[in-house]
Amino acid sequence: MSDLIKIKKRSHVPYQKIIIETIALAGIISMAVLAPNALQSLSLFGYGKRGISRRNLQTVRSTVYRLQKEGIVDAEEQEGDIQVSLTKAGERKLAYYRAHTLKEEFVPKQWDGKWRMVVFDIAERKRKRRDWLRRELWQVGFVRLQNSVWITPYPCEEFISLLKVDGKLGVSTLFAMVEKVEGDQWLKKRFQLVQE
């Protein structure tokens, strides 16, 4: 069975993630360069070697146009080519992907011994924003310590900074890095930082 057929059978090829990562590495990049580079990056994401066919290139282009509509990328025509770059929303999306990657690739023996903690006090009238924040924290691997206190060992400072800006959270949400949490043995077990 060819690599191409194997890839087709996968449930989801992360084109959006690959394109955003490729743009982030290059800064501003032309579509002519972005499309083949994004396809070559598939192997970095465990999708093997994939031929650069017209259909593949069209998928990359259509994904870029969709990202532009969503405000994730800027695409401007210059001298007959389209120059693509990340917007602020794109940078937040990149931080989100990277936070998830940290979670997926985290190796307990590499833990630096520090807990990352998010503490928030968001008014009841802003309940939707509070629920959104909890959902975002849970998705990148935070555990609820108390109702408004969430904790993780994963390095994610950049993600939290961008999350605060994205959610317009201001001083209602604080980030802290601590070396000791009282009774943290259950947390260490939860994050597989110690042998049970």
Image: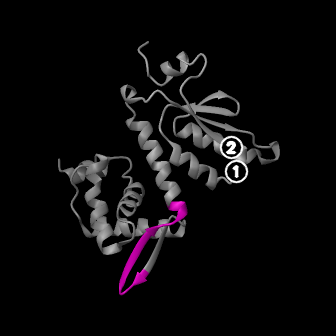
Query: Residue 41 falls in which quadrant of the image?
Result: bottom left
* Extreme residue toward the front, this view: 179
Label 2: few (<14), some or many (≥20) within 10 Å? some
Q: Position of residue 131 (x, y in %)?
A: 69, 42
Q: Are marks 1 and 2 in contact (CB under 8 Å)?
A: yes
Does the stretch in magenta take in 93?
Answer: no
Does the stretch in magenta take in 87?
Answer: yes
Q: Position of residue 71 (x, y in %)?
A: 54, 67
Query: Residue 31 falls in which quadrant of the image?
Result: bottom left
Residue at numbered disc 2: 173
Residue at numbered disc 1: 170
* Extreme residue toward the right, this view: 125
* Extreme residue toward the left, this view: 1
* Extreme residue toward the bottom, this view: 79
Using the numbered discs, state the Cα–Cα distance from disc 1 to disc 2 in whole angstroms: 6 Å
Task: Give me the residue at 59% from left, 43% from top.
Answer: 136
Above/below status of 11 relative to 50: above
With 57 as the anchor, is 104 left or right in this view? Answer: right
Q: Position of residue 5 (x, y in %)?
A: 24, 51
Q: Nearer the viewer, residue 126 or 67?
A: 126
With 58 as the anchor, is 162 left or right in this view? Answer: right
Q: Amino acid at mark 2?
A: Thr
Task: Give me the residue at 24% from left, 66% from top.
Answer: 53
Label 1: few (<14), some or many (≥20) within 10 Å? few
Above/below status of 55 relative to 143: below
Task: Give me the residue at 49% from left, 20% from top.
Answer: 188
Above/below status of 58 relative to 16: below
Q: Which residues are magenta?
A: 77-90
In what element is the residue under mark 1?
helix
Task: Give me the residue at 27% from left, 66% from top.
Answer: 36
Q: Amino acid at mark 1?
A: Gly
